[in-house]
Every structure is written in structure tokens, then in C-alpha cells.
Image (cartoon, helix red, strand yellow):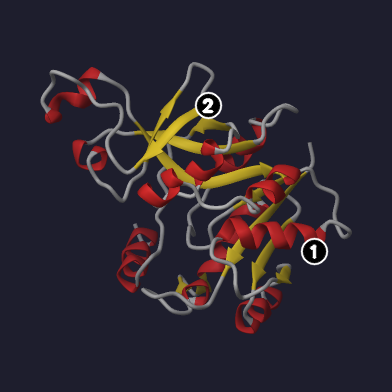
Amino acid sequence: MRFIALIPARFQSTRFPGKPLALLGGKPLVQWVYENVKQALDHVWVATDDDRIFNAVEAFGGKAVYTDSSHRSGTDRCAEAARLLKNEVEFDVVINVQGDEPFIKAEQIRQLMACFNGKTEIATLVKAIDSTEELFNPNRPKVVLDNDQNALYFSRFSIPYIRGEKENSWLLANKFWAHIGMYAYRNDVLQEITRLDPGKLERAEALEQLRWLENGYRIKTAETSFQSIGIDTPEDLQLAAEWLLK
């Protein structure tokens, strides 16, 4: 299989405007992501609708592609970028890497790539939950897996429910998985899922991957032991800077 990595990056953000260009250790966040992904994959592009981001990427030697400003999700932006690049580079699978994950590891990219055996439609990463606080945090989506490591369901609630056990004992009674929001899609599947209307499950949980499950697509998972640091606010950036100095 042939792979391309796309990093959707927009300038406007409610909580952190200009986030992709915020400096961490003297480099913009988007450069951290780009350079880490390049350790695993030759074909890497930033997909953006903003001149400032586009120019910054080219300035550090990266590749960027302009996409429409109306996209509501990174998945939609990646789908357009894939259409624009199909005549420039050959690929079968698109890896969608979030532009606010500066410490993403090349190993995680390789894990996603290893999921594709000709039958895989979509792949993502999961990590074992090791604290009760994380288990019951609605901002950390959980996922239930089948025996072949395919996702059965994603939820902000702690699933599965452990009947007859107190909540502080759930981790002793069952293994729980957190979802790491990085995706890879066969390009034909990526184009299909972005044409789907949001479903009831997606609207209920505010998790776009439920739209894909609701329409019969299968999501293969791979286990990672690494929890990267996502940058959503200026405070998160400060914490990342402190982590970098350790």
C-alpha cells in the first residue's frame, strides 16, 4: 500500500487563534508535527486555507496545499487535499495527523500503516486506560473492541458498564481503551465518508467516527503506549514547553 500523510491546519480557532503557528521551543507547532511525521513517511503535506500557515510551512522546507475555508472537520479538509494531490503523488491510503500534536511519534504512524492489509477501510489508535480519572473523563473518548481489534463503538461515557462493581473498581474488572484521535483511511473510503450526512449517534456523542460505524464501515485499531500532548489552549502550550525542558 502507498501512503500519504496530511496535516489539516486552520488559523481560526475559538480557544487559540493562530495555533498552528504558535511557537514551541522556537518552532511553530505545525513544524513539530510535520518533522515528526516525516521520520516515518516521505509524502507529507499540510492542508490549510490560510496564507500565513502555507507560507510558514514552505519557509521551513515543508509542503503545503490550499484547501477551502468552509470545511467543518479535519477529515473533510484531508479529503479535498487528497483530491488535489492525486495527480502529484501516488497513494492508496491517507493518514490524517492532527496539527496540534507536536510530540507525535513516528512509531504511531507506522502502527497505522501496519493496519492496512488490503481489506482495511479505516484505522485508528487506542491506548489502555490506567486511571479512574481518565476512565470517567468525558473529554477522553472510549472505545470498545471486538476480538479482531475492530471498533464496535466509541463513547464519551465509560464503556462497557461493569454491573455489580463500584466505579473505583472498574479498572480491576475489565480492560478499557481510550481513543487516540489519529486516523488513516483508504482514499476511496475517505471520499465516501465525507459525503455522508451526520447520523443520530454522531449528534448524540459529538464524535464523527460514529457516523462511519453507523453506515457500516469498519475501523481497525492498533494499540499505542504513548499519550501525546494535544495543544488546545495557550495554557496547554505552556505545559508543553515545560514538558520539553524536562
Q: Residues within 10 Å of mark 1 (few under 14, many from 20)?
A: some
Query: Tag count in the figure?
Result: 2
Direction from residue 29 to residue 112 in the image, left or right = right
| Residue behind mark 2 | 150
Where on the picture, by quarter, is residue 156? top left
Residue drawn 48% across and 57% down?
101
From this view, report whether residue 124 is shown above or below residue 195: above
Using the image as rendered, state which of residue 178 and residue 152 is in the foreground. 152
Residue 215 image position (x, y, % from top left)? 57, 38
Disc 1 marks which residue?
84
The residue sitting at the bottom extreme is 51
In the displayed structure, 85 sits above or below 104; it is below
Q: Tell me residue 238's x, y (percent).
A: 32, 69
First reached walking from the N terminus: tag 2 or tag 1: 1
Instruction: Find the distance from the CA under tag 2 to the CA under tag 1.
Output: 30 Å
Q: Residue 51 carries which label?
A: none
Query: 210 and 168: which one is in front?
Result: 210
Image-based side of 108 in relation to 134, left or right: right
- The C terminus, quarter of image: bottom left
Marks 2/1 in contact by CB < 8 Å: the verdict is: no
The secondary structure type at the circle numbered 2 is loop
Q: Position of residue 95 (x, y in %)?
A: 65, 48
Identified by mark 1, the residue type is Leu
Using the image, determine if residue 165 lies above or below residue 204.
above
Residue for point 44% across, 79% down? 17
Q: Which amino acid does the dot numbered 2 rest on?
A: Asn
Residue plotted at (71% across, 68% down): 62
Judged from the image, the secondary structure of the residue bearing numbered disc 1 is helix
